[in-house]
């Protein structure tokens, strides 16, 4: 199955150049449908003129984004500082939703 997700330019470019291999998302009902081997098309947002294609190689389920981020090298997320990554993800997802759904790390590799 193919999934489509929007990404801002900075993380989009990091996936494109191979320096970001884990995408952070809320483990809500939409993300719960993602399975190993699925493909994800990332669309550069807001322009939406460029896309990259990836394959899901692992699904990392955690209670919090902080636990997930601190379990892996910060470079896997395309970042330089773990605390900034945690703050950044909370700009998109509230702590209430994080408690409700949990955190999901989607490990990916470029395809095509």
Image: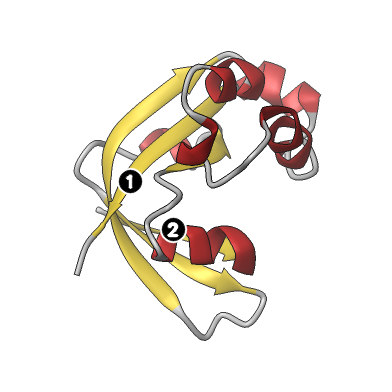
**The quadrant where residue 8 appears:** bottom right
- Give the class, few, some or many, for how many residues have Cα within 10 Å of label 2's Cα (few <14, many ≥20): many
x, y percentage for residue 14?
Answer: 49, 59
Taking depth in this image into account, of 96 and 14 the one nearest to the observer is 14
Secondary element at image label 2? helix
Q: Are marks 1 and 2 in contact (CB under 8 Å)?
A: yes
Quadrant assignment for the C terminus: bottom left
Secondary element at image label 1? strand
**The quadrant where residue 21 appears:** top left
User: What residue is shown at x 58% (from left), y 61% (from top)?
Assistant: 7
21 versus 85 height, above or below: below
Taking depth in this image into account, of 12 and 103 the one nearest to the observer is 12
Of marks 1 and 2, the one in the foreground: 2
- Give the class, few, some or many, for how many residues have Cα within 10 Å of label 1's Cα (few <14, many ≥20): many
Q: Which residue is mark 1?
A: 108
Mark 1 or mark 2: which comes first in sequence? 2
Q: Which residue is mark 2?
A: 15
User: What residue is shown at x 54% (from left), y 33% (from top)?
Assistant: 74
x, y percentage for residue 86?
Answer: 71, 31
- In the displayed structure image, the side of residue 36 where residue 103 appears, left or right: right
User: What residue is shown at x 57% (from left), y 58% (from top)?
Assistant: 11
């Amino acid at each position: 199955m193919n999934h489509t997700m929007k990404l801002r330019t900075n993380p989009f470019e990091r996936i494109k150049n191979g320096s970001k291999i884990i995408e952070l998302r809320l483990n809500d009902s939409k993300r719960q449908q993602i399975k190993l081997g699925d493909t994800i098309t990332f669309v550069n947002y807001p322009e939406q003129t460029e896309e990259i294609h990836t394959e899901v190689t692992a699904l990392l389920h955690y209670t919090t984004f902080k636990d997930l981020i601190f379990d892996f090298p910060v470079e896997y997320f395309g970042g330089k500082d773990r605390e900034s990554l945690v703050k950044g993800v909370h700009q998109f997802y509230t702590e209430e939703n994080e408690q409700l759904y949990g955190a999901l790390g989607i490990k990916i590799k470029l395809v095509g």
